[in-house]
Image (cartoon, grey):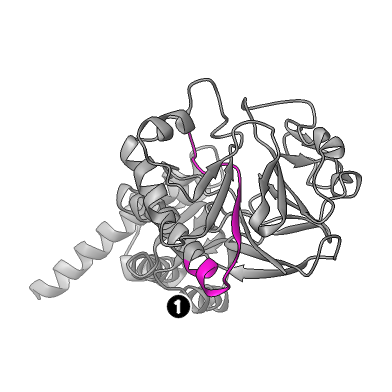
Amino acid sequence: MLRLLHTADWQIGKSFGQFDPDEAALLAQARIDAIGKLAAVANEHQVDVVLVAGDVFDAQTVADKTIHRVFNAMQAFAGHWVLIPGNHDAALAESVWSRAERLGAVSDNVTLCLTPEALSLDALKLTLLPAPLTQRHTYQDLTAWFDHAESPAEHYRVGLAHGSVQGVLDDSIDSANPLAPERAASARLDYLALGDWHGVKEINPRCWYSGTPEPDRFRSNDAGHALLISIAAPQAIPEVTVLDTGSYRWHQQHYELRVDSDLAALEQWLASLNDHDVVALSLEGTLDLALHHHLERVLNQTQGRVRSLHAEMHQLRVAPSEEDLAQLAAEGYVGEVIDELKNEQHGEQGEAARDALILLADMLGQQRGDKEAQR
């Protein structure tokens, strides 16, 4: 029995520049923490080798201390780790990998496959066939040599590659770094471990993408896992178990708000979230002033509870009700301004008009409150 842990796309050093600095720092730290989780899983399941199918680092320019942190985190599993470069950390003449070697960061139980050469682990009766990227983009299948690679008859044959399986992934996926969908069969592989697609995806029973162990984007593609691969004997069909490894849950939600019940549904969903949730929320519709103020309170409360919440509200309009206007005593010129701002919300400056309308309503409400307090 051969047990492998298949992971990829750690992308350590990812900056998360679209988030506030404090949020970005925690999301980046979660990617380092994921290595410790992988090590714990490897220990729990007593795996023989951990396979990392590329994009360990997000860029060649990560700091030296980041390189040390990665390899130090891997030491929580004392067994064998095998890594290949991906498109983000390609094995250039001068790369993050050459720096790691100069720094002495790579421990004895870690093998960096920087060239397309078979790696024989005789104690496990395992021959690994790596297809490392030596430049960011290639337009030929780097796994082609697997078909002719020799290995002892009694050995397991396992491939390790990073790229896009042709004709299988979404049409929007970059066509660079192509991989043949039939490679596992043509190369007589027991298993082909792939990286580049950030979610778990089965190509065929012998070929899988593991996805990233920690979600890093809003695309819903089953991220936040690693794969436990059990192979009973050479040429046996692998048993693949999907293991949860992610800390944060990323949500991209759209709500249309028209009436009280719409806002109540949004509020109920937001109440189900906690500090493990990263949320991108888009809102559209029309609310009166009372409901809009309630929405702002709900969003402010949620921002203090979740890891991150970004609410896109440029399609949300405010329409003061007759009750709102009566309470504001908006007559004469002020009433005309309110009507004009209501209409301008549907033009090019709609978001500015909405904000101005809310600000004006707040000012009128404050004035009314001050007058009542003086009585």
**Nearer-the-camera pick, 111 or 22:** 111
Where residue 81 appears, as percent x and y from the top left, is: 54, 52
Mark 1 residue crowding within 10 angstroms, few (<14) / some (14–19) / many (20+): some
Residue to which mark 1 is pinned: 271
Split into 4 quadrants, where in the image is the C terminus?
bottom left
In the image shown, does 236 or 9 lie closer to the viewer?
Answer: 236
Q: Nearer the viewer, residue 91 or 172?
A: 91
Q: Is residue 159 left or right of residue 291?
A: right
The picture quadrant where one finds residue 335 is: bottom left
Relative height, residue 104 to residue 204 (above, below): above
Could you tell me the amino acid type at mark 1?
A: Ala
In the displayed image of the protein, which residue is found farthest to the left? 374
In this picture, residue 211 sits left or right of residue 334: right
Q: 364 above or below 136?
A: below
Q: Which region shows up in magenta?
A: 40-59
Is residue 72 inside the magenta stretch? no
